[in-house]
């Protein structure tokens, strides 16, 4: 709980019913901030369309909020609007509530879902771009000084860059040789090279932020997050009705959580391609802590967009599967890759900003086993094995490869 | 007329009723290509909303097409759909017509209009991003190999870059120093720094193109066009019903055409700010010729997005006003700048791709006077002087400046 009234922040959590949004919201409330969740519940509705459910049984948002208050939590309010569609309601809410900050998770966040069909590609672009742009336009129209903390992705950088190159926190210093033989040095937004339509929308967000920061002075922190693993944080473990969602299906399940669940039910761990893909990871506990740090350390009104790499470890996917296999005795199954991506890459990431702000990472070695026992094994009987395979293919060539016997 | 059947291209011109689209469409038909215009007529409808009209009297699209055929032109067909809204109709049209290429002008193209209000910002982003993305998704879904020729803008590069630096055609070669003292060289998409919400949408388009070219192999030529001046081309001068539009209002009028019209009616030439802003220009005749060259010289299926700088001359806005004043005797009026932009910049642009393909530029010195006499003076009595001032301000600070006495 915050000691001083003046460090309390009034904050909207857009997408505060989702996998990252919900633990983020309760963590911020627990830290003494005034939290209002804004969510159109699209994540639950997509589950209905896909015919899947969270492995963990999750309560409705209304029940979650009741349980939070009943267990002594600081009140969290809820508004059920769609920021990509209900611009006028969003503007009214900003004008009447006058938030200090907005944490923005309200985007379609699964790469495989974004590649499922022309319709899901179009939904992802329309929803993510208009949602982010509506937020920016509404803040400008309100005339208020509202700090935006946005959840981006490490995937904006791409995974095809030079071997051994370090990925900086958002900006890259380059030297530009000129035709006349001179050269100049410039700090540029790191070139983007997204690997899916979903990741592409986050590269579009970056340009929206760059422009609105430059033209209107909006204060923005963009968090380039790695792949999140784990399920609960201390606050969501206080009552079963507070439990966070755990996705294991081929569209929304993130790679490490899928391995943990597969190990728990005796399903061979699905590695797509060679397993040589290296990705960045972060535990959900560290993710919510990073958002809090970003919120409590806002940029000044003259700063350009502040970009943090929100990740703690990099691992090759195949090595990760082996780690889980060693821990649990599971088998590893190498499958054709539905994604169009580099067979293998390295990934060296600068993440010193959060470490300097005091982040103490949860390592894989600390957290993996408890996740398997407390979550994956506990709810194993809720798993629908038919929803485990990844069926969204990036191109027709990839679709043919995964359908081959 | 093309000599050989096999060099004939079946092409959609999206936005083919607009200022650049209409002359482009008739030029391509005249060159022997099969043209189908797709347009939702939004440009005419925005004129209705704004209460303005083209200085030149323009016929309806149906009358234009009748007149074109009556005067011996190769048939041009028309489909009145909205590519940002009518995805299924667009897909059906691509599937049934199987075009070889699509020229894409179907975006809201005025920077001042895009900054007019929160509603016009949102319309511009929603319309331009979804329109471009629908086109890309529909081509992928159709499974056809369709070359996209897109009208972008020189404004994607921004006008704040280093003095004396040359703007290359889309891609910039940079050297990247690493923390360990090594460095590597990379060719990147030129960093973008848009000056309005409109320009920002064109930077978003670039990332859409980059991704769909990489993932799906779509062949794309992106034309980074300068400010277009002039009105008619030879083909639109054949009959009064073929005349092109001429916008002079504060939202849609482009700077040089506004000077010409102001000179014709004895209104002082409106220079906003110091006039030190340097911009790139191209005559409408050269613009349609460049589109034809791009169409007839498509990239191969393994090429990355081909980017051309579609401009022929750079001028400071104040010097341009002085040139028109010298030619016509008009006065020059320096006004507060409604835009948030650099007071002064230089602009050195590489445009050798089109020159090497055979473009012979129309220079300002050749074309200015005939434009004043043939268009601006001829239709001067149709001008509504009250619509000349620029009233769209980039920020509240700019709005206050232009409203001050």
Image: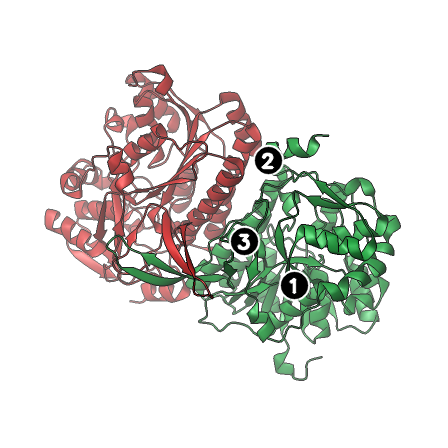
Chain colours: A red, B green
* Cα–Cα span, label 2 and label 1: 35 Å
Report which residue position mark 1 lands on. Answer: B13
Image location (x, y in percent) of residue A353:
29, 39
| In this view, the mark in front (2 or 1) | 2
| Left or right of A108, for residue B309 | right
Output the chain of dot 1: B
In the depicted structure, whether residue A61 falls above or below residue B350: above
The number of callouts visible is 3
Q: Which residue is mark 3?
A: B156
Disc nearer the start of the sequence (2/1): 1
Is residue A334 found left or right of A181 in the rendered image? Answer: left
| Labels 2 and 1 share a subunit | yes
Q: Quadrant of residue A164?
A: bottom left
In whole angstroms, how far apart are the C-alphas of marks 3 and 1? Answer: 23 Å
In this rendering, position of residue A383 left or right of residue B219:
left
Q: Eyeballing the image, is B101 above or below B334?
A: below
Q: Nearer the viewer, mark 3 or mark 1?
A: 3
Please tell me which residue is depicted at 34% across the width and 57% down the height of the picture.
Answer: B176
């Amino acid at each position: 709980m915050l000691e001083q009234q003046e460090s309390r922040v009034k904050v909207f959590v857009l997408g505060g019913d989702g996998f990252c949004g919900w633990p983020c919201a309760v963590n911020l409330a627990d830290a003494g901030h005034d939290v209002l969740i804004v969510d159109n519940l699209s994540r639950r509705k997509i589950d209905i369309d896909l015919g899947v459910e969270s492995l963990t049984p999750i309560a409705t948002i209304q029940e979650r909020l009741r349980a939070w208050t009943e267990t002594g939590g600081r009140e969290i309010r809820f508004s059920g609007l769609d920021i990509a569609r209900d611009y006028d309601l969003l503007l009214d809410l900003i004008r009447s509530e006058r938030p200090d900050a907005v944490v923005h998770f309200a985007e379609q966040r699964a790469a495989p879902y974004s590649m499922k069909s022309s319709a899901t590609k179009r939904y992802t672009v329309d929803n993510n771009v208009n949602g982010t742009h509506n937020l920016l336009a509404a803040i400008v129209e309100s005339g208020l000084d509202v700090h935006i903390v946005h959840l981006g992705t490490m995937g904006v950088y791409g995974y095809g860059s030079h071997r051994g190159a370090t990925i900086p926190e958002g900006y890259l210093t380059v030297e530009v040789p000129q035709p006349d033989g001179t050269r100049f040095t410039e700090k540029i937004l790191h070139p983007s090279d997204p690997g899916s339509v979903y990741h592409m929308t986050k590269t579009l967000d970056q340009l929206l932020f760059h422009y609105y920061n430059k033209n209107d002075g909006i204060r923005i922190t963009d968090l380039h997050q790695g792949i999140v693993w784990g399920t609960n944080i201390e606050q969501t473990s206080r009552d079963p009705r507070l439990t966070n969602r755990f996705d294991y299906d081929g569209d929304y399940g993130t790679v490490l959580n899928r391995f943990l669940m597969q190990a728990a039910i005796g399903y061979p761990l699905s590695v797509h391609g060679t397993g040589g893909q290296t990705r960045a990871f972060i535990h959900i506990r560290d993710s919510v802590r990073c958002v809090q740090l970003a919120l409590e350390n806002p940029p000044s009104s003259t700063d350009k967009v502040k970009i943090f790499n929100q990740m703690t470890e990099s691992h090759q996917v195949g090595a990760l599967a082996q780690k889980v296999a060693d821990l649990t005795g599971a088998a590893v199954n190498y499958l054709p890759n539905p994604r169009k991506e580099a067979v293998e890459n390295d990934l060296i990431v600068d993440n010193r900003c959060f470490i300097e702000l005091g982040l103490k990472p949860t390592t894989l070695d600390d957290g993996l086993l408890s996740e398997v026992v407390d979550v994956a094994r506990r709810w194993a009987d809720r798993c629908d094995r038919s929803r485990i395979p990844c069926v969204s293919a990036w191109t027709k060539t990839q679709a043919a490869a995964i359908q081959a016997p």
